[in-house]
Image (cartoon, helix red, strand yellow):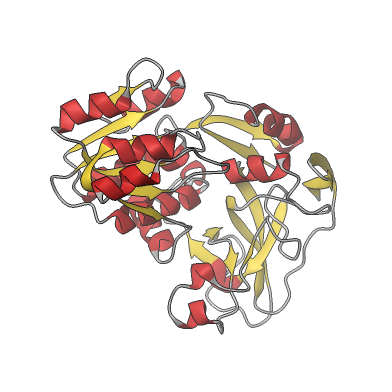
């Protein structure tokens, strides 16, 4: 099969790779689409991915082979997969926090689990989720970032009537807007410099969108919310966003860190004075299945989020393009 493989540190190349075969308890999926995640771009550029890895964890497709002992799945089923393999025996697994499993492995990140920038991908049957007819293949390829955003909104404790501000209108930020609105947010402001992403934020429910170099979000949000937002979601790796978020929320407000990737300059003393709660949000638990249901019910939409669909052969070039600031939102790869 054709696959995008880490040829050397930081280098992605499309070449022939062995077609996976389903062992007991496994299925092989013929990939329809695989989304390029911001983490994929960063980990490739940083040389984190091991040589020989096939990346890609945001995918959907059709079951093409079913291994021994697999019940409930048949060739031809439309599926996506939660791309996380866990040990089920460590402290975190036994306490229901398996996304922090001590031996966690992720499809397309760990060498033992080749990813979906390929014609076929193999996963454990218990990773699969059936795609309802109401969810298109393109939408299904965005399910994973939707689940990430849904968890962040749940952890924030946002209530009906609260105000929110979202820093960054990439896929995570755009889903955070919609999930926060679904959870009851009365007003939502977005801070985003890229024109295309700002436009998508307005389309998908933001009340106001600010360019951080043209408007000081701390002043603008403070004026609109009469003292600061109740919750801020940091969905960007911009180094200034975390501190700006702390300054944008009200006293005793909450800041949820969903995006990152580098050092940030902060003023901890201000956090103390305002008694602001700053909390990280990582991956998802049952939010993956819940995000699929939100897509099925059209509670969240993908409208305007998919910037481009490219063939597998173009994946290396697109990764290079995405390594610098861009207005692209979500690029899907079609093997």
Q: Is residue 35 above or below residue 292?
A: above
Tell me if residue 254 can be seen.
no
Figure quadrant of residue 261: top right
Q: Residue at x 76, y 45 (%)?
A: 47
Q: Residue at x 65, y 78 (%)?
A: 25
* Residue 115 image offset from top left, x and y in percent: 69, 55
Horizontal side, residue 34 vs residue 282: left or right: right
Residue 204 vs residue 119, the one in the foreground: 204
* Residue 207 image offset from top left, x and y in percent: 23, 28
Tell me if residue 204 can be seen.
yes
Q: Is residue 70 above or below residue 188?
A: below
Number of disc labels: 0
Quarter of the image with the C terminus is top right
Q: Is residue 310 above or below residue 55?
A: above
Q: Residue at x 65, y 51 (%)?
A: 31
Horizontal side, residue 254 vs residue 314: left or right: left
* Residue 110 image offset from top left, x and y in percent: 71, 61
Residue 187 vs residue 222, the one in the foreground: 222
Which residue is the extreme one toward the top?
214
Horizontal side, residue 60 vs residue 314: left or right: left
């Amino acid at each position: 099969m054709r696959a995008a493989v880490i040829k050397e540190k930081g280098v992605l190349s499309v070449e022939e790779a062995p077609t996976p075969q389903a062992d007991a308890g496994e299925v092989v999926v013929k990939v329809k689409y695989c989304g390029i995640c911001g983490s994929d771009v960063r980990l490739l550029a940083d040389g984190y991915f091991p040589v020989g890895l096939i990346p890609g964890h945001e995918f959907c497709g059709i079951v093409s082979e079913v291994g021994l002992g697999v019940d409930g799945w048949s060739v031809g089923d439309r599926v996506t997969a939660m791309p996380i393999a866990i040990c089920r025996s460590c402290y975190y697994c036994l306490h229901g926090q398996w996304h922090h499993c001590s031996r966690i492995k992720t499809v397309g990140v760990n060498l033992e689990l080749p990813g979906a920038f390929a014609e076929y991908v193999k996963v454990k049957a218990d990773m699969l989720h059936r795609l309802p007819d109401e969810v298109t293949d393109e939408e299904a390829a965005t399910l994973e970032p939707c689940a990430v955003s849904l968890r962040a909104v749940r952890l924030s404790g946002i209530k009906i009537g609260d105000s929110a501000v979202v820093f960054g209108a990439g896929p995570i930020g755009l889903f955070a807007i919609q999930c926060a609105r679904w959870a009851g947010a009365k007003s939502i402001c977005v801070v985003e410099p890229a024109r295309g992403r700002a436009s998508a934020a307005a389309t998908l429910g933001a009340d106001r969108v600010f360019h951080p170099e043209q408007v000081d979000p701390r002043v603008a949000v403070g004026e609109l919310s009469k003292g600061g937002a109740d919750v801020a979601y940091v969905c960007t790796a911009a180094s200034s966003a975390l501190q700006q978020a702390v300054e944008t929320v009200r006293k005793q407000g909450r800041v949820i860190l969903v995006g990152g990737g580098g050092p940030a300059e902060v003023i901890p003393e201000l956090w103390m004075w305002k008694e602001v709660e700053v909390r990280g949000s990582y991956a998802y638990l049952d939010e993956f299945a819940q995000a699929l249901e939100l897509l099925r019910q059209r509670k969240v939409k993908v409208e305007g989020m998919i910037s481009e669909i490219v063939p597998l052969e173009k994946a290396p070039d697109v990764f290079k393009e995405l390594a610098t600031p861009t207005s692209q939102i979500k690029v899907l790869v079609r093997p």
